[in-house]
Image: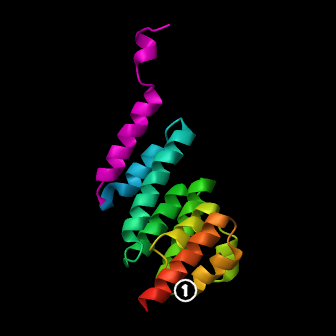
Amino acid sequence: MTGPQLDEEPAEHRRFGHYLQALEAVSESDEAALVAAVLRDQDTVMADSAVGRHLDRRAADLLTEPRFTAWAQTMTRMIVDRDFLTRRLREWTLLRTVALGRPWAADELTGASDWFQRMAATTQIATSPEALRVLAERGRTRRVRNGANLQLRHLEQSN
């Protein structure tokens, strides 16, 4: 059962690839308009996935930059009706709070998604010993708890 229609890449895959390329190359001044255009795609799951990847990349790039706040406010307006994207951006903002040493509550960390807890516990992004202790003790998964303990040991050895 091979035929020309089976050998072709589905249209949503082509659009997804196109969106990723466009979002990667977009200027800051055109970013909001492009995100809005992508989110208007009829395939909402695919659109959310493309914008989610973009949010992850941009948030990681801007995490400790002063521009993060204005960028996050703009993106919040663009994704207000998308639950997953809204939560992801909120968790990037929490990760920024921890990374910058600003006040946070233990319940924010323990109530966050598995993704957030893994990011905070297993990457060099958030090196707050207090946050790592919370995740080492109360992280949702063994992977998070072990990762946080490992990060704590690295911090103690470097001090």
In the foreground, 88 or 118: 118
**Quadrant in the picture for residue 138:** bottom right
Q: Is residue 90 visible?
A: no
Q: Residue 128's x, y, as percent?
A: 52, 84
In the foreground, 138 or 95: 138
20 inside magenta stretch:
yes
In the rendered structure, which amino acid carries the disc numbered 1?
Pro
Reading the image, the residue beneath label 1 is 129
Few, some or many residues within 10 Å of mark 1 (<14, 14–19, 20+): some
Would residue 117 be found to the left or right of residue 140 on screen? left
Would residue 101 be found to the left or right of residue 81 on screen? left
In the foreground, 103 or 158: 158
Residue interval drawn in magenta: 1-27
Q: What residue is rendered at 39% in x and 52% in y? A: 33
In the foreground, 8 or 153: 153
Q: Residue 144's x, y, as percent?
A: 61, 68
Q: What residue is rendered at 46% in x and 59% in y? A: 56
Q: What residue is rendered at 50% in x and 7% in y? A: 1
Q: How many marks?
A: 1
78 inside magenta stretch:
no
Q: Is residue 24 above or below residue 97?
A: above
